[in-house]
Image: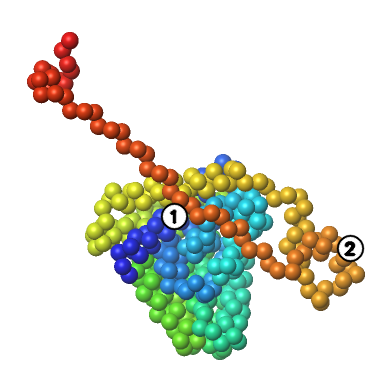
Amino acid sequence: MDRQQALALYRQMLLIRRFEERCAQLYVEGRIGGFLHLYIGQEAVGVGAISQMRADDYLIAYYRDHGYALARGADPRALLAELCGKVTGISRGKGGSMHFYDVTAGNFGGDGIVGGHLPLAAGIGYGIRLRGTDQVCLCFFGDGAVNEGAFHETLNVSGLWDLPVVYIIENNRYGMGTSIDRASSVKDLYQRASAYGVPRRDVNGMDLLAVRNVMGEAIERARTEKRPTLIEAETYRYRGHSMSDPGKYRTKEEVESMMKSDPVLLWGKRLMEQERFTQGELDALDKDVLAQMEDAVAFVEQSPDPPVESLYEDVYVRSPYVHMKTAEKDPAWRAAIREDRLPQKLPAWTPPAPEPVPAAAPAPAPAEAAAAPAGGKMRS
């Protein structure tokens, strides 16, 4: 990658970090309801993997899905509006934290059921195979999903039918509050793919470059050989499972130790050492991201709540197989539309203009300068 691409990846991780931090603040203030699962600490996995995708590829994820949407280019204004239940949200305020759905970007959203979306990923891969295209589907899930039956069924059919899907386990060491040491008899989760003849790899999920390299190989295999891959990205979440989880099952020392491998800090250090960016340039980028988040909050504050009538929308998809005499009595059927509505296209965000630098005071005349004392104060 070139120097500017390396900086762009840093900005993506930084945007995810600042977005999630602001979400935590809004949740505490009571402006975000329901569940909220933060991606803080895992940014290198989502950004590294999605940076290797093509524009026409697909992704599907689980409930910790904010980072994927941002890495795929979703507008943080629309995402924050969704979290706050506004009609300008990416799912019109009806999906909330777990359902950032963006069909224009090939993002089939999150899923609140542990492992429930893995068969859907296989279905996306099967659709690619039937169409005969060279697209790829990326499927993200946590370590808790590998003990679900859907995981094994999906890997079996993916290996059997040669589906172009890359399955990524984000092993953050805890399925909710249960350590992987207490939940899995096989600690190397990627080895489970061997039972189904599926290629497998593990990778340091805190290292952006390592994730990119491993994902590049897996995506190329899916694209050219039509074969799936199971990748285990060993990462760590700094917060609890959700905002309601204080995380008391972990020691303070463990969290602090893992923070030394923080993916944002490590990539920023690389940018300064190898790409010759200065700390001042990275600080200016952070300031720009924070300004973008302030703009997103202002957008949410100006956005209306969904109208009451929208309760009837998005319940049905019009289909000739629906029993018409029954459906026509339902106001939700009358509100149904024939085609899926796309998310609102917001104007591109532009950073605020830099503050003007005050003009320097004119230099004193030589005679006046000589009359000034050492303290700089003129005598009367």
Q: Quadrant of the N terminus?
A: bottom left
Q: Disc 1 or 2, which lies upstream in sequence?
A: 1
- Which residue is depicted at the point 40% across and 44% down? 353
Residue 92's place in the image compared with 150, above or below, is: above
* 309 horizontally vs 178: left or right: right
Question: Which residue is at a point 47% across and 83% down the rendered structure image?
Answer: 223
Q: Position of residue 377 (x, y in %)?
A: 18, 18
Asked whether the viewer can see residue 145, the reply is: no
Give how far apart the Cα atoms at labels 1 and 2 are.
47 Å
Disc 2 residue type?
A: Lys
For the residue labelled by badge 2, is the local secondary structure a helix, a strand or a loop?
Answer: loop
The colour mode here is rainbow
Please state the total of marks drawn on the protein image.
2
Q: Residue at x 40, y 64 (%)?
A: 44
The residue identified by callout 1 is: 15
- Quickly name the residue at label 2: 329
The three-letter code of the residue at mark 1 reads Leu
Dot 1 lies on which element? helix
- The percent position of residue 380, horizontal first and vertical second, equals 17, 10
